[in-house]
Structures are given as structure tokens and as C-alpha cells.
Amino acid sequence: MMRGTPVLHIQNLHKRFLTEDGPLPVLRGVSLGLEAGETLALTGESGSGKSTLLHLIGGLDYPDEGEITIDGAEIGALDDKGRAALRRDVVGLVFQQFNLIPSLTAGQNLSFQARLAGRHDPDWDQTLADRLGLTDTLGRYPEQLSGGQQQRVAIGRTLAARPRLILADEPTGNLDEDTGDAVLDLLLELAAETQTAVLMVTHSRRLAARLARQVHLSHGQLATPSEESAAE
């Protein structure tokens, strides 16, 4: 994977939700793109539509208008099975809730996604465990791990499958600042080494500044920080 390879392309995305007062526009003409190895932070007030945008990109919901193309596949042209395959094989998801499987050990959780995708590589698992500081915890169950350790396992699980794109929704939101910074460091470092594109939703401008690009979602539209400042 080389830099300059399109991974995500979004064009004129619209999403509305029905309410008692009629349709509520949440996204109004959102367009953006990501290349291999590129990192982008998406900020915005609570309820601005950040998570909605991630759900649309992940194929968990449908836009009213517009196109989303991931690794050359236009999501609107895929059926449910195709969308599930895209999430399994191409897109990695990291959430604020760690979503580990309680009945599996840390090591089994780490390899879970890669096994589903048919790309399980024990050597890569071990490399990730070493880099994420999990070597001594692989035999433990999630309830025996700290929050930081659980989030490291969640990140390792995503990277073990070698996705082209990682969607991260407040991935450090349940962690204290120091632990969150360390986890984000590892995510960005490993994503850069594997040329994985990262789109991270965060409410923190401080964390957003750690990524290569930042955009702000407000009133259903995107603006860069410089455009936002000029408008104030």
C-alpha cells in the first residue's frame, strides 16, 4: 500500500432523520477523502452527526443522498452481505466501548477479527502484542484487564486483520488522559507503519491536533479549523 492510494471517498452525503416535526437534516452535503496511511480527526459538538457519519461509512446505515466509496467499492451498490464483508475485510472499527468478547482471552480477542477475515497471522499477532504491551496479559479475560489494556486489545484486534481503513469513535473516551495519550500514540504509530488510513471522531481538539488533518462538523457541514475560525 502506497501513499496516494485512495481508500475513502465521500461525495455530497446527506442524511435526514424523521421526527414528529418532520425531517431533521443531520448531514448536508458532506464530502471528504482519505488516502492510505493518512489520518483525519473529525470534531463537532454532541449531536452534530459525527457518529452518524461513521455509521454510514461503516455501512451500518444508509445515506439519503450521496456516495461512499471504500477501497474502490461503492457502498450503495452492496447488499447486506457485501457490507458485512467490507466491515470484515477492509474496515476496522474501534469504539469508546471496548466491545471485547467476555468468554475469550485477550489473545483470542486479539486474533478474532483476523480469523473472520481469513488473514490470521500468529507472527503478526505476536508483534502487535509486543508493541501494545500485552504479552503478559494474553491469557487473561477482559474482566481481568484494566481499561487501557482492554482498549489496547481492541486496537490490536482491529490491526490484526490488516484493514485498509480504521474508523475510531472516541477511542480514548473511557481512559484517563495519560493512558489515552499512550493508546493513541500506539494506534497512530502502528497505522503509519501499516499504511492504514484512520478517521477518528473526537470531542477533544487537543487529541484532534495529533492527527495529520482535522475537520469540524457543524450544522451538517464540514469545515477545516482555519475555515471555522474565519467564520467566527
Image (cartoon, rainbow, N blue to C red):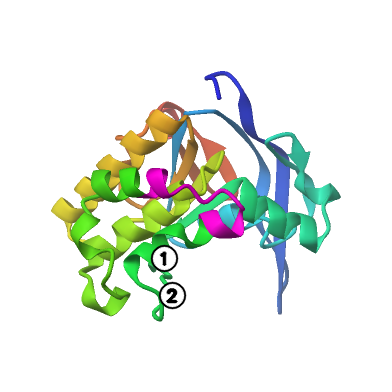
Q: Nearer the viewer, residue 58 or 26?
A: 58
Q: Residue 52 appears at what percent x and percent y?
A: 59, 59
Indicate left or right for 78 with 218 as reference.
Answer: right
Compared to 176, does 211 lie above or below?
Answer: above
Compared to 208, does 62 lie above or below?
Answer: below
- Residue at 40% of width from left, 59% of height from top? 110
Q: Which portion, as a residue range, is magenta?
A: 114-125
Quarter of the image where one finds residue 16: bottom right
Q: Is residue 116 visible?
A: yes
Q: Residue 168 appears at what percent x and percent y?
A: 45, 51
Q: Nearer the viewer, residue 115 or 145?
A: 115
Q: Does the magenta portion include 215?
A: no
Label 2 with label 1: CB-CB less than 8 Å: yes
Q: Does the magenta portion include 121?
A: yes
Indicate left or right for 73 with 194 as reference.
Answer: right
Residue holding disc 2: 101
- Residue at 14% of width from left, 52% of height from top? 178
Compared to 141, does 223 lie above or below?
Answer: above
Indicate left or right for 178 with 230 as reference.
Answer: left
Query: Which amino acid type corresponds to the residue marked 1 in the rendered image?
Result: Asn
- Residue at 67% of width from left, 47% of height from top? 28
Of the numbered discs in the image, which one, if any, rests on residue 161?
A: none
How many numbered callouts?
2
